[in-house]
Image: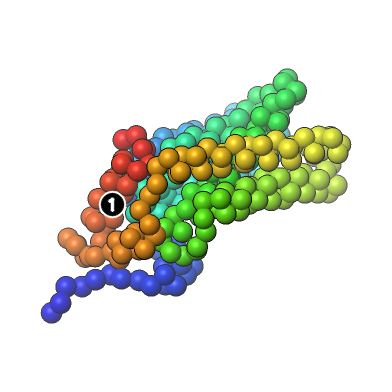
């Protein structure tokens, strides 16, 4: 009987059920092999622990507690999911992880530590970091999809789309959410059109800075072509038949050699 091969078409790879299965299967691999992913899990997990313990000891110690807890938990889930989905490429770069953890921590301290009230430009710094983190994650995701042959986009197209995604999510959608929070709940998060425009500018500058750095890095460190990468993609079952040993080797190789994620 010929050796079993676990080969999936691109359509099969990107169905909802296959994505969930891939995340479930690869997340333990990511946490075992990537020091960066572990540091991110520890960092964001620490923020979650701080929020929970703080609420137990001093209920109402920070404004928007439920939102902060949900945001941090969702951020951790998204980052680890992207690492798991793109485990064969080495996952997100350590710089992207650092931006995500930094922006989340800064936002939490801004509210719980009253940094937004104490330092006038603090809010703009958080928006800059958030815009940069979203743009970096979007750019890397598009780059991985391009290498797999799922999308066909040049580096400048990916940079433009990543910046637009960041502006849409961190800028337009977020500012709309803050406005609606004021209207419905009287949260006091919006301080006039000047503040809103300043936030959007900070979001945009963060996104532009991130994609500019990533474009320069990619131009200086060209990767093999998507067709060559696609030929490597089929996961051949080895060992116990799950294919995890091969994926594990690829993750170590890609993350150490190409993405320079510290081990």
In the picture shown, does residue 52 fall above or below 146? above
> Residue at the spot x=68%, y=47% of the render?
167
**Residue extending furthest toward the left:** 1
Q: Residue furthest bottom?
A: 1
Q: Residue at x 74, y 49 (%)?
A: 172
Classify 201 as above or below 87: above
Which of the 4 image quarters holds residue 240?
Answer: bottom left
Image check: 142 left or right of 240?
Answer: right
In the rendered image, the residue lying farthest to the top is 118
x then y, percent, for residue 220: 43, 40
Taking the image as shown, residue 108 lies to the left or right of residue 4, namely: right
- Give the residue drawn at x 44%, y 72%: 11
Examine the rendering and report whether any part of residue 138 can be seen: no
**Residue 210 shows up from this direction:** yes
Give the x, y percent position of residue 248. 27, 51
Q: Which residue is mark 1?
A: 250
Indicate how the structure is coloured in the image: rainbow
Q: Is residue 196 left or right of residue 24?
A: right
Q: Quadrant of the N terminus?
A: bottom left
SS state under label 1: helix
């Amino acid at each position: 009987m010929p050796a079993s091969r676990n080969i999936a078409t691109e359509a099969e790879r990107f169905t909802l059920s296959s994505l969930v299965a891939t995340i479930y299967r690869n997340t333990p691999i990511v946490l075992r092999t990537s020091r960066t992913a572990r540091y991110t899990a520890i960092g964001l997990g620490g923020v979650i622990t701080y929020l929970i313990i703080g609420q137990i000891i001093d209920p109402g110690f920070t404004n928007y507690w439920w939102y902060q807890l949900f945001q941090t938990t969702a951020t951790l889930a998204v980052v680890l999911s992207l690492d798991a989905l793109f485990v064969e490429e080495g996952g997100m770069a350590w710089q992207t992880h650092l931006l995500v953890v930094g922006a989340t921590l800064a936002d939490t301290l801004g509210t719980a530590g009253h940094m937004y009230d104490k330092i006038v430009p603090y809010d703009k710094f958080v928006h800059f970091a958030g815009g940069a983190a979203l743009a970096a994650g979007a750019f890397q995701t598009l780059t991985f999809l391009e290498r797999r042959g799922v999308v066909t986009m040049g580096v400048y197209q990916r940079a433009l789309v990543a910046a637009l995604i960041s502006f849409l999510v961190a800028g337009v959608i977020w500012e709309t959410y803050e406005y609606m929070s004021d209207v419905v709940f009287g949260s006091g998060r919006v301080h006039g059109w000047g503040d809103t425009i300043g936030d959007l500018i900070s979001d945009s500058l963060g996104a532009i800075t991130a994609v500019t750095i990533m474009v320069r890095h990619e131009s200086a460190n060209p990767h093999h072509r998507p067709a060559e990468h696609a030929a490597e993609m089929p996961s051949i079952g080895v060992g116990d038949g799950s294919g995890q040993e091969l994926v594990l080797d690829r993750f170590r190789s890609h993350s150490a050699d190409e993405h320079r994620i510290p081990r």
